[in-house]
């Protein structure tokens, strides 16, 4: 049986980053793009260039540095968006313009466009994009809720106008596998010129079927899957890259498709995306969850010792999970730390490594065993050193029968100040102290604590999500002291909000750019 090639189109930096709270900094986007490029992603959708100055800058920079991936930008179906998109992607060795409009009755109503007017818009947009770039992707957004005849007509127009990839989005996660396969199969059979283009699937996970729907679309003839790392994305997220890639690999017997993905790089990028987006991976998430390869029940362990295949359909090392997660102790040296961090996907400059090494030694003194996840948490903390607001010191008194008091010192843009604040428990008191030293109106939307590893000396990872005037930022931190981790996460979220404020000031703010046309 010969294997067909399925292209992997990653939209972590566009559809994923668009998810409320998942905003990444410029440097983080570049880093994720480098990792995607390095792991063999065919097409990286790097952003929505008209949405903000920040998006434009990120897409252009990623376009300049990508080595093998095609770099794609998103644009609505109007000349202004398309021109801006081209301005950003044109630097890539292989650029792509992705243009779209919602074609279902809901979207036609929203745009106040008749079918004929929308058909003309599609023709003009794709023709314009093709005049700029040889590689143009068309998406009939909300395709799975678009009337069949009209959907076929939009695809027909896009192909005739020069689109080279046709994407069929299940924008609201409405379809199911049989329908998903049939839709692509029927379009390929009935649209003129279909054999000359690549059909693509883009599924959302609202009913938990994004992976199944994407694989079914491939069975129907799609040869591009749009997906994100960890399934990051709005609402219930997008198709998870790691799931479709590993499904096709593990079940190659009935899904004879190849991708260009180096699967051993999956774990590192998964951890990295979780860290920079502030969206932790659920423990029982397929492929990349903490428990995905853990075998705890007695029966399982017995079976595993006799033959790993009894309960494992893939090997942990296939997705980049190394044999043992126990890495270092307090006697480990700088060279060992550097090698381990490299293994985990972090290449560090000498001064960065020095900072991490100091923190590693501090942690190793407090904690008997230092695991991969501990090290990743340490590196993340180190990245916070560039921030406007930094935690200098914290001392909390609390107990039964009274409020807690927090004595806090922050460094804000180089100036240290201290305060004592009270609250209902140590975390509340500490957060009140932060608010007094750095007054703001951001609302705490989410506060979440997880243990990074096991035992009472484990580090706690804390996530805080803040909302301010529609801008959302998630901060994370880890420490063996839960209250310290909480304050660091809160301060990290504040720093991210500051970046968001700066980013949205000069251009068009992302929140103002929705799927409705700017005209
Ligand atoms: O979900 C969707 O329809 C999209 C399009 C812009 C492709 O993300
Ligand atoms: Zn989408």
Image (cartoon, helix red, strand yellow):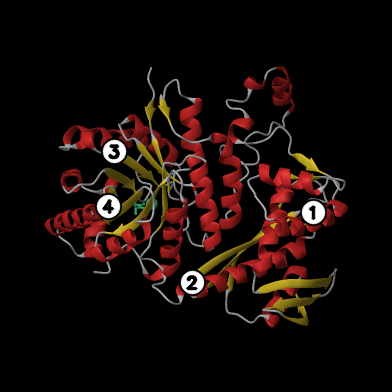
- For residue 3, above or below residue 458: above
Which residue position is annotated with label 2?
503
The image shows residue 380 at horizontal and vertical percentages of 67, 57
The image shows residue 42 at horizontal and vertical percentages of 41, 41
Q: Is residue 320 left or right of residue 148?
A: right
For the N terminus, the quadrant is: top left
Label 1 CB sits under 8 Å from any ligand 2 atom = no
The answer to whether the residue labelled 4 contacts the one labelled 2, judged by CB atoms less than 8 Å apart, is no
Which residue position is annotated with label 3?
198
Which residue position is annotated with label 4?
133
Quarter of the image where one finds residue 435: bottom right
Label 3 CB sits under 8 Å from any ligand 1 atom = no
Specify which label sits upstream in the sequence, 3 or 2.
3
Tag 2 secondary structure: helix
Which residue position is annotated with label 1?
360
The answer to whether the residue labelled 3 contacts the one labelled 2, judged by CB atoms less than 8 Å apart, is no
């Amino acid at each position: 049986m010969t294997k067909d090639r399925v292209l992997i189109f990653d939209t972590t930096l566009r559809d994923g980053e668009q998810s409320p709270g998942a905003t990444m900094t410029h440097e983080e986007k570049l880093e994720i793009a480098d990792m995607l490029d390095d792991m063999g992603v065919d097409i990286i959708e790097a952003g929505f260039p008209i949405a903000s100055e920040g998006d434009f800058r990120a897409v252009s920079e990623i376009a300049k540095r990508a080595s093998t991936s095609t770099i794609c930008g998103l644009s609505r179906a109007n000349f202004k968006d398309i021109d801006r998109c081209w301005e950003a992607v044109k630097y890539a060795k292989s650029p792509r313009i992705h243009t779209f409009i919602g074609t279902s009755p809901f979207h036609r109503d929203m745009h106040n466009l008749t079918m004929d007017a929308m058909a003309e818009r599609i023709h003009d947009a794709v023709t314009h994009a093709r005049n700029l770039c040889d590689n143009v992707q068309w998406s009939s957004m909300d395709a799975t809720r678009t009337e069949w005849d009209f959907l076929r007509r939009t695809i027909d127009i896009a192909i005739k106008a020069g689109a080279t990839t046709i994407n069929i989005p299940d924008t609201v996660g409405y379809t199911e596998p049989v329908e998903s396969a049939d839709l692509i199969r029927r379009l390929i059979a009935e649209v003129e010129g279909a054999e000359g283009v690549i059909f693509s699937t883009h599924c959302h996970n609202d009913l938990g079927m994004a992976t199944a729907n994407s694989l079914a679309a491939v069975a129907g003839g799609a040869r591009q899957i749009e997906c994100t790392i960890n399934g990051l994305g709005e609402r219930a997220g997008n198709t998870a890259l790691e799931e479709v890639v590993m499904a096709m690999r593990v079940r190659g017997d009935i899904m004879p498709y190849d991708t260009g993905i180096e699967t051993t790089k999956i774990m590192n990028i998964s951890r990295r995306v979780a860290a920079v987006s502030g969206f932790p991976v659920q423990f029982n998430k397929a492929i990349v969850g903490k428990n995905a390869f853990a075998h705890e029940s007695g029966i399982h362990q017995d079976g595993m010792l006799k033959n790993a295949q009894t309960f494992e359909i893939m090997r942990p090392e296939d997705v980049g999970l190394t044999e043992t997660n126990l890495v270092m102790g307090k006697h480990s040296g700088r060279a060992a730390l550097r090698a381990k961090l490299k293994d985990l996907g972090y290449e560090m400059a000498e001064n960065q490594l020095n900072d991490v090494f100091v923190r590693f030694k501090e942690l190793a003194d407090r904690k008997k065993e230092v695991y991969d996840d501990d090290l990743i948490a340490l590196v993340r903390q180190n990245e916070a050193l560039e921030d406007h607001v930094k935690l200098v010191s914290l001392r909390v008194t609390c107990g039964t029968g009274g409020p807690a008091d927090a004595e806090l010192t922050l460094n804000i843009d180089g100036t240290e100040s201290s305060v004592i604040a009270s609250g209902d428990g140590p975390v509340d008191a500490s957060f009140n102290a932060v608010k007094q030293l750095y007054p703001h109106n951001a609302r705490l939307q989410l506060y979440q604590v997880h243990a990074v590893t096991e035992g009472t000396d484990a580090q706690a990872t804390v996530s805080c999500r803040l909302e301010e005037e529609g801008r959302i930022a998630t901060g994370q931190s880890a420490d063996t002291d839960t209250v310290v981790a909480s304050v660091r996460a809160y301060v990290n979220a504040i720093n991210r909000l500051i970046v968001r404020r700066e980013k949205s000031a000069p251009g068009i703010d992302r929140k103002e750019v929705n799927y409705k046309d700017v005209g």
